[in-house]
Amino acid sequence: MFLFISSIVFSILMAIVILFQAGLAVGMPWGKYAMGGKFPGKYPAPMRVACLIQIVVLTFLALIVLSKSGNILPGWFEFVNVAIWFVVAFSVIATILNLITRSVWERRIWAPVSLLLLLTSLIVAIA
């Protein structure tokens, strides 16, 4: 049950991050809340493309967690036993970067989210 809840919490949080990235990609003026606030307002075109790529990566990470927890894609089981540690490492890096960013808004909003993503992915990894 704890494994299931952790994977669902991870997926919901990841969906929020994906929606945020989608908003940046379509031109929402949320640049001060990402990338250390380097691009306040609307992202330039190359950064919007980067958001689309990140959406694909984040979706794949969520699929790994959901598969590892046994919720979807049972044929991926052998792959996700290794790939889940990539998700954990990705979450560690994201948490560190969100904690050390110069952007106060990123620390307030995304540091807690990335820490929860780290904790839930770690629970799924060791379960």
Image (cartoon, rainbow, N blue to C red):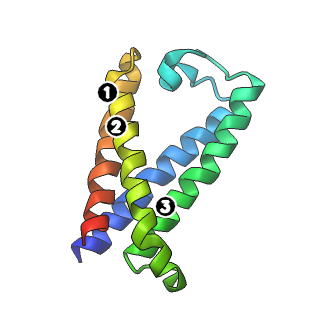
Query: What residue do we see at 40% from left, 63% from top?
Result: 84
Residue extending farthest to the bottom is 75
Which residue is identified by label 3?
62
Dot 3, crowdedness within 10 Å: few (<14), some or many (≥20)?
many
Q: Position of residue 17 (x, y in %)?
A: 49, 44
Find the distance from the CA under tag 1 to the CA under tag 3: 22 Å
Task: Please tell me whether residue 77 is drawn above or below residue 89 in the rendered image.
Answer: below
For residue 73, say whether it is visible.
Answer: yes
Circle 2 residues within 10 Å: few <14, some 14–19, many ≥20: many
Q: Position of residue 37 (x, y in %)?
A: 51, 17
What's the amino acid at mark 2?
Thr
Q: Which residue is mark 2?
A: 95
Q: What residue is pinned by disc 1?
A: 99
Amino acid, disc 1: Leu
Residue at screen point 49% across, 85% down:
74
Q: How far across and down, in percent of the image, does residue 38 sit?
A: 55, 15
On the rendered image, what quadrant is the C terminus found in? bottom left
Marks 1 and 2 in Cβ contact (< 8 Å): yes
Comparing 75 with 44, the one in front is: 75
Left or right: residue 47 versus residue 37 is right
Q: Is residue 26 above or below residue 120?
A: above
**Which image quarter: residue 1?**
bottom left
